[in-house]
Amino acid sequence: MSVRQTGPLRRTCRRAGLDRNPMRRPEDRMQTVLAALLLLAFLASLPLAALLVAGPVYRAEVRAAAAEQAKLHPVRATVLTAEHAPLYAPVSSATVRFTGLDGAERTSVHRATGLLTPGGEVTVWLNAAGEPVEPPQAARPLGRAVLLTAGVLLTALTVCGGGYLAARLALDRRRSRAWDREWACAPWAGGAGA
């Protein structure tokens, strides 16, 4: 008696339902084809999401950051007095002196996250009117693009996974009805084959 050897490829095909097993019902084959199609749809959404979401979001964020920074003017300021920040609040205040856009010397209160020492220099941001304002937000266009793309891909995965589960539930019900019909026709159940 010879035992037929099965390799890993043949074993994988059998487990995935891609073999020619006569015991597989049409519903089983439909489920396998549907799973493959939904997997391909999800894999196709990867480059589409990068092309249609990540690129435009990244470019829009870079433009927005550049536009915000174009409205502000950085000037160097000298720290006159500095307050020590408590350990629980990493933001410290200091009085700084800088030359405004009109060339006049000005003083202002400046808040920074770093250690400020009298005599040191810091960058103060001025608006078009020459008033000190908060520094521009640190632009994170790549992070936002990745986050939004991940959200789109998670949505695509949810839709594909939900579609598969809904189809599998419908196919399971169909298989159960077929099983009940066949069981009622079995000879030992008193069916037509008796």
Image (cartoon, grey):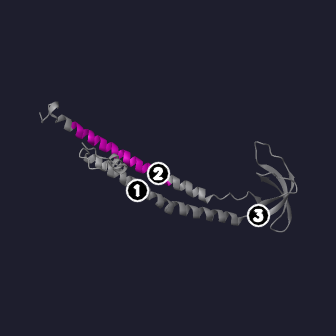
Instruction: Report if residue 156 lies within the magenta region.
Output: yes
Is residue 161 toward the left or the right of residue 61 in the image? left
Q: Which amino acid does label 3 sit on?
A: Pro
* Coordinates of residue 92 in the picture (x, y in percent): 79, 49
Q: Is residue 91 above or below residue 132?
A: above
Task: Give the prevailing secondary structure in the magenta stretch.
Answer: helix
Do tag 3 and tag 2 residues touch (Cβ < 8 Å)? no
- In space, the residues marked 3 and 2 are separated at their CA atoms by 42 Å
Q: Measured along the vertical axis of the image, is residue 49 above or below residue 32?
A: below
The residue at which mark 3 appears reads as 74
Going from N to C along the chain, the mark reached first, 3 or 2, is 3
Crowding near the residue tagged with mark 1, few <14, some 14–19, many ≥20 C-alpha atoms within 10 Å: some
The reply to whether dot 1 and dot 3 touch (C-beta < 8 Å) is no
Between 159 and 3, the one nearer to me in the picture: 3
Q: Earlier in the sequence, mark 1 or mark 2?
A: 1
Residue 41 — which label? 1
Which of label 1 and label 2 is nearer to you?
A: 1
How busy is the neighbourhood of tag 2: few (under 14 within 10 Å), some, or many (20 plus)?
Answer: few
How would you rate the neighbour count of disc 3 (Cα within 10 Å): few for under 14, some for 14-19, many for 20 or more? Answer: some
Quarter residue 40 falls in: bottom left
Q: Give coordinates of residue 93: x percent, y percent.
A: 81, 50
Question: For the view shown, which residue lies furthest in the front direction?
Answer: 1
Q: Which amino acid does label 1 sit on?
A: Ala
**Vertical position of residue 123 compared to residue 30: above or below:** below
Q: Name the residue under label 2.
A: 155
State which quadrant residue 186 falls in. Answer: top left
Provide the residue span drawn in magenta: 152-180
In the rendered structure, which disc, 1 or 3, sits on the residue that comes first in sequence? 1
Q: How far apart, in angstroms, are the residues tagged by discs 1 and 2?
A: 12 Å
